[in-house]
Amino acid sequence: MTINEIQDELIDDFAFYQDWMEKYEYIIQLGKEVPLIQEDYKTDDYIIKGCQSKVWLYPKLEEGKVTFTADSDAIITKGLVSLMVKVLSGHTPEEIAAADLYFIDQIGLKEHLSPTRANGLLSMVKQMKLYAIALKAKGQL
């Protein structure tokens, strides 16, 4: 699936839920499904700066595609990073760097997150795109 197809699927998934309590429950559930980062990578080198909670994100380039693993010490934040991993993992660095992540606005995340969580989400997006650019430039981290 393309990045846009995954985003469209998430928009449909979120439209199913009637209120934001249900949507938060769905985000928490997604956090339980995130591919977990290896403990070796839970270091300051892989912490996302700008998140109030601790969020670790590790990129790997295999066969021309980037896969991300992640974890967080907060359940909502873990769900948010899981959303980003779901959308961007398994794509080329070029696709990730060029992605227009319109689903964030369309599902209403920006309006329903606290300012600190919204900033953290933007930091996740920025870091994932930076990793993609770095992987493309270096061939591998």
Image (cartoon, rainbow, N blue to C red):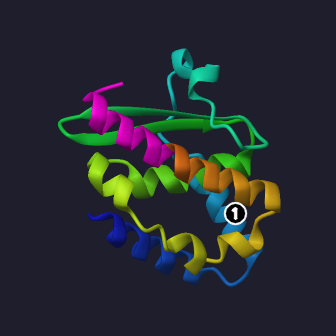
Query: How far across and how far down the image is residue 125, in percent?
Result: 54, 53
Question: What's drawn in magenta, residue-wise?
Answer: 128-141
- Residue 138 falls within the magenta-colored stretch: yes
Residue 14's place in the image compared with 32, above or below, is below
- Residue wearing tag 1: 25
The 10 Å Cα crowd at callout 1, few under 14, some 14 to 19, many 20 or more, is some
Give me the residue at 64% from left, 21% from top.
Answer: 44
* Picture quadrant of residue 111: bottom right
Residue 58 visible to the viewer: yes
Residue 91 visible to the viewer: no
Give me the residue at 61% from left, 19% from top.
Answer: 43
* Picture quadrant of residue 49: top right
Going by the picture, which residue comes out furthest to the front?
137
Q: Quadrant of the N terminus?
A: bottom left
Give me the residue at 56% from left, 80% from top.
Answer: 106
- Residue 57 falls within the magenta-colored stretch: no
